[in-house]
Structures are given as C-alpha cells and as structure tokens.
Image: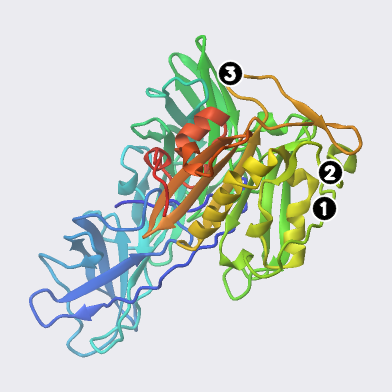
Amino acid sequence: MKMKSLLGIMLSLSILQSCQNDETNGIQNEVNKNGITFMSLIDDTNNSRAYDTSWETNDVIGVFMLASENKNILETNVPYVTSKGDGYFISQNQPMYYPENNSTVDFIAYYPYNENTNDHTNYTINLSDQTKQNAIDLMTAVNLTGRDQTSPQGNLQFKHLLAKLVLNLKSTSGSSLKGIKASISGLKVKGIANLSNGSITPSGEASAFSLYINEEATQAEAILLPQNLSESVKIKLEFNGQSQEIDTKLSGSIEQGNKYTYNVNINYQGGEITTDPQAQYTKWAETPLITESQLAKPNIKYIIHYTGETYQNSALNGVEIRNYSMLYDTDLKMAYWVAYPLCSWYLGDSGRTDAWGYDDKLAENLQPNLLKGISGYDRGHQIPSGDRTRSNSINSQTFYYTNMTPQIGQKMNQAIWADLESAVRGWSSATDTLYVVTGAMPTTQTDQTIKYVQDNDGKNMAVPKYYFKALARKINEQFQTVAYKLDNISYSHRDYNVGILSVKELEEITGFTFFPDKPEITESIKSQKTSWK
C-alpha cells in the first residue's frame, strides 16, 4: 500500500484549503464466477499514511460477511485482491455470494490481510518490526451494512486504527545523515484489535523498537499503537558512535488515526551530534521550520495575523482564516520571511489602502517608524498589497511596518520585483492554493556585514542584501515548487527568471527549511527549477 501524509497535528494547528472529490463506486453481486466484488477508497480525512492513499498492485484485504439480523458469521476472512491496484477487489479463489433467501448482510473488511485471522474481534497486532510500514498500518472498513443484491452502490471506506509518527531530519552541517538510527523506548507495540468496532487493546510490556529510516536519511517513521502515556515520547538518535535524545513532547496519549510530525535539524561536526528540534508554534502548509533555538532568542518574534473572517460551510466552520505569519527580528527591525497562502478568496476589489502603521502584535519601539518613508529606498512589502484585496481590513494589514524593508525603488521594487509579484498572482489561478514564502536577508554566505538605514525616529533598520520567494502548488494531484532570489540592486531589465533557483538551493543559501509539514513535497520536488506558466 502506498501511503500519503496529512498535515501533522503535533505542535501545530493546520488549516487546509484544498478541495476533495467524493468518489462513488460500487459493491455488486456479479452473475458470474467472481461473486461479490468490491470497490474501495481510503478515507484520508484523519489517517496515518505517509505517502498517498492509493492501493498498490496485488494488495490483499480480508473480508467477513455477517448476517445483519443476528451478526452470525456467514463467511470468514475471505481474501480479496486488487490486481491492478485500482481499488477494485475481487476474490480469485473463494468468492462470496449474497444469501439465496435475500436476507441482508454486513461486511467487515481489513488491511493488511492475515490468513490466520479467523476471529474479527481478535486481530493480533505486533509493531516491533517497522521495516515495512504498509504491512503493519491496520485499516478497517465497516460501513457496508444491511446489504443485499438490490442495494445501491457504495464503497468500502477504509479508516486507520493506528497512529503515525514522522520525524523529518535535516542536516545543517552539510554532511549526509545516511547511517543514522532512531529508536523509541517505553511504548507498547503489541495489542488486539476488534475489527468490527475499531477498538484497540494494548497488551504486554513496553519495549524499545527502531524507526524506519528512508534511503535518503531525511525521514524516520513509525506506526504507533494507540495508548496512554506515562511520560512524553522520547526518540534516541545514533550517528557515527554519537547519540542524542529528543523529547517530542508528545504526552498524555497516542490517539487512533492521528499523524504526529516532528521536525529536527541535526548538526554533525567534529565527532559530535547536536540537534535543534522544532519549536512549538502555530503553523500551516506554507510556514517554514522554526526551531527551539530560534525562538529562544529574545529578538526573534513569531507573529501571526488573521483576517477576522471564519470558514463557512466546511469542516472548518468557525475557524478564523489566517492572513499571514512572519519571523521578525526586533534588533534588525525586519522580518526574515513572511509566509501566506494565495488563492481567489483573498483577492477582490478593495484596492490599496495605504494604511501605513505599526503592527498591533508588537510593541511600537520594536518596530521602525516608516510613516514618512525611508530615505533612498521604497517601503518594500514582503506580502504584497495586491495579494490581499478582499477587503480594506485585510489589505491594511499588509501596510504594517513589520512587513516593510528598505528596497531599491525604480529599478527593483517597482520593476523586476513587481513583475515577479504579478506573476505569482497569476500562477495562483492554476491551483486551489498557492503557498508562498517571501523573505529578505541582510547577509549572504560570503558577506556577513549588515548595512543599516534610519527610520523616521532615528532607529536603525537593516537593509536586505537580497529578497527571495519559495513557492509550492499542486497541479493534477502533484506538487510543484520553484524559488527566486533577487539582489537588492537596480536592474537594467525586468526578467525575474535571472533569479530562478530550486527550493532546495534556496534552503542551502538561507538556512531555512521550507514546507516542512508537507511530506508530499519531497527532496526531488524541492529540486525542481523550471519556470511556471
């Protein structure tokens, strides 16, 4: 079974703005040797899969048929296979048929198939071996009840009974992490599942087990048994004879069907391994990684602005819609990055408010006063005013001084950079949501000196040496990424593609990790470097 990641819930609140298509497939009784066949789907609204929700060729499920009236078992653990991996399951050896007396039946289906499972209330779970994640990620489908030959079409809707832990690993020293090991102790790995109601009963003693490490050593994964915790889950990393323990802060209980994502930067130099785990912060698909060491600095502030409007007519009813977030340096008086979603909902006809003012999320003395502009520079927006025209109130938030930096005007901000901003708005129309990170850096890898200008009150604010954008979108169910980097100089032309690079290259230049909570955006996708149309 291939697996698909959803946004993790650990240490985060994820607001998704994507559209899902409902599928309608059928369960039918074929008048041939195949008997009853099934169509199926995997319910990915709250699951633990790591890659996608499609079946693989020759995946096998087990099916029980019960009499609806008294729940007597009519057929026991019949194997069904999807030979093409399309979710169409057929029994090749012992097909089931509806009762000849036209009585109704219920179906209980599960994955992965175990030929020794004869009791649907007593399915044995053992998660000690994590090397094949799909072979232990238990799913059940119990939605098809009261069925007979005349029943309307429907699907076997599979749900996940276990949980998933994903540890995203990033080397900050430039060295490969291949050979790294990760393990967990203090968790129970054995239990019994009742396939009819999805309940899990842990059994045995807690034990240690190794996480699965992917080939690139960028991700460690574990399927977890739902259980109450006596203490927070800790992960031990081992690399080249050195070890380091990480406290995931996952405590209380491991909940069925949840996926817990944890990001950690790893530095290995001079024979010593050090880690910088992800901090606790509210994040979304576009939010770059923020580490504990970053937020520990008194001058670094994570700021979030909401629109004042809430989602309607969706599963997120009543949840306030985000505008943008930023990582702001009170010493430099500038944001390193501003992250935001871009889609048609944010665009309208409010126009430019020019509501220059202080950010209400931060003390005024920690911001520049830019009411009268910046001598020699434009007040360059990081999230453009043109990306937030739904209403005056939403647009006015783009005019906060925290969103401004000293940017070269006529031949940068008003020219090549403006054209790039316009292109980004155009690209957003090709997808449900375009995820954007716009940033500014006061130093480079070879020039660590910082240039300052003064605000209207005489306070110093840093002048960026370059600006960047990291972009991600989904087209035909596949993510695409691209990035841009433009120096803060006067350009003799307006071809922003001179600054094109991959998101992976931008990560190496800036030190930031982009889209850390979208495992679908793999390293290969981050390596894309093709101009969008």
Q: Position of residue 405 (x, y in %)?
A: 73, 40
Q: Residue furthest front?
A: 492
Which tag, 3 or 2, sits closer to the chain's start?
A: 2
Q: Nearer the viewer, residue 471 or 532?
A: 532
| SS class, disc 1 | loop
| SS class, disc 2 | loop
Taking the image as drawn, is residue 205 in sight?
A: no
Q: Which residue is mark 1?
A: 356
- Vertical placement of residue 171 versus 102, above or below: above
Q: Position of residue 280 (x, y in %)?
A: 66, 41
Q: Residue furthest right?
A: 457
Q: Nearer the viewer, residue 420 or 346?
A: 420
Alpha-carbon span between mark 3 and mark 2: 30 Å
Label 2 CA crowd tier, 10 Å (few <14, some 14–19, many 20+): many
Q: Which residue is mark 2?
A: 370
Instruction: Determine whether, in the image, residue 29 is placed left or right of residue 475.
Output: left
Q: Residue at x 36, y 35 (%)?
A: 214
Taking the image as drawn, is residue 51 in sight?
A: yes
